[in-house]
Image (cartoon, grey):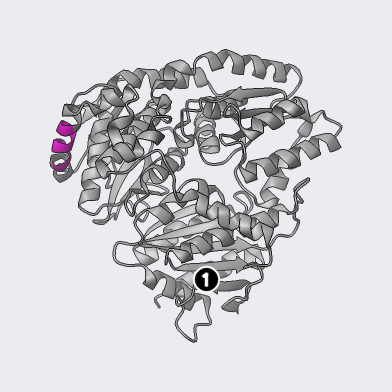
Amino acid sequence: MAEHPGDVAVTIVDQRLTEEAAPLVRQLVSDQVASKLTGQDPTLWGPEAESESAIRLSWTTLPETSRPLLAEIDALRAELRAEGVDRVVLAGMGGSSLAPEVITNTAGTPLVVLDTTDPGQVADALAGDLTRTVLVVSSKSGSTVETDSHRRLFAAAFADEGIDAASRIVVVTDPGSPLEKTATEAGYRRIFQADPNVGGRYSALTAFGLVPAGLAGADVGALLDEAAAAATVLAADTEDNPALVLAAALSAAHARGAEKVVLADTDSGIKGFGDWAEQLVAESTGKNGTGLLPVVVESPTAPGFADAGEDATAVAIGSPTGGATLGTSGSLGGLMLLWEYATAVAGRLLGINPFDQPDVEAAKKAARALLDSPGDGAAAEPSFVDGPIDVHATEGLLPEGTDTLAGALHALFAAAPRFGYLSVQAYLDRLDDASAVLLRPEIARRTGLQTTFGWGPRFLHSTGQYHKGGHQNGVFLQITGAVEDDLAVPDRPYTLGVLQTAQALGDGQVLAEHGRPVLRLHFTDRAAGLAHLVTSLAEVGR
């Protein structure tokens, strides 16, 4: 066990894994990887990664360099509260939303997170009390299409209510981004410039994580204190450095075939950490046909964790119970820094660059192409219709004569190779269609496959990189739904519903180009479609 009271700890339960990880830890210590990483040495991942890593390592110093933000956040929060503005809505994707969400959920402070293009979910956010609302628009690139759409919709909604939109919009972005220019020209309430030398998934302790969480009322100063307490330990070239132990354990397990990392919370007190770690690990390692696929499950007794096979490492967030192979414990700030260090070091051990995301752009390009030509793909005839569900399948997936949903599901499950995985991708309303998350444990239980669940397009900024760049043994269940009340995006030639469909079809197209089986189920009635899917799942394998 690598433990440091008050900071973070990694405990390996499996003796075999302890023995396999030990020589890797010794080599990392000998190579002074921890101290070099803290010193922002860009050579740690080889010459091909050097140019990218040279501009992506400032996250190691954030527990100190982000402290000037605290007073600015407190001052703005006080100003807003004095004006009666106490409802914070965050428009952001990936690293811009996942960190603030786990920070505020853990703190018990309300934050409305918009990382969706579902018209119903966005409409719900717009229906809140706008007289009490401030919108935080977060985008590192400043050109994220989802976030730009949210900004436009809220600006129009504020204006319709007679509210000065500029006074209610706060921006977090990189210096010089298109969003910074827009915000400056529009006179938005405040622009927070984030550190440009930190990648999105490593940005939890930058303005991207701290500003929305702090405005919502979370104690982000304490978060930095927690990270600072862990920082000295994580920078040390010692064999009990928790980051080195975690990286070595995950890499040693991967070397013998455990390419999935199943994450379950074991009463850590931290809410939603797995969703944040999912992006960090998947997007950092899932490339060049290798990587670690995070599988976030509901509990340590959930299918996929308690019964994890040779292809998976069960990792507890908290004490290593319920069949966990290892556990990571500590404060939220400490754990965030621990996993960032460990993921970067695992990249070195896996022989990949943990700071790029070469396959993420492919799905974005495909979606943009469909927005430009909405007739391409959107009007495709389904393979067949079963009740309230139109069934679309990639070529060759369905045996001839398949005309039931149960038969199509069986074909998809059977297409997964040994030690493959199944990804459920729900382009639905995370609030009104929340029961869709029950599909993950049910499918995992019935198939024995490691099964992930992601809300679309949220997962495109998370596991989307792994699906195209990682181990090519996944099969994909896409779910889309009819839109009753669409929302037109101001000054754009598309609605949110059209954008949502383009994102689903675009990603499915890219997956198919990678030779991956995709089954898309379009619910013509969302509630009835989900019920029919559950019924059909029960029929599979009878």
Whole-percent x and y of residue 368? 62, 54
Nearer to the camera, 378 or 123: 378
Residue 320's place in the image compared with 441, above or below, is above
Q: Amino acid type of disc 1? A: Thr
Nearer to the camera, 460 or 482: 460
Which region shows up in magenta? 20-27
Nearer to the camera, 48 or 331: 48
Quarter of the rendering containing residue 505 = bottom right
Whole-percent x and y of residue 49? 35, 38
Kindly give the residue lying farthest to the bottom in the view shown: 401
**Magenta residues, dominant SS class:** helix
Quarter of the image where the N terminus is located: top left
Whole-percent x and y of residue 239? 18, 27
Q: Which residue is mark 1?
A: 535
Relative placement, left or right, of 239 versus 211 is left
Nearer to the camera, 518 or 470: 470
Say which residue appears at 29% left-offset and 42% top-offset: 321
Quarter of the rendering containing residue 109 = top right
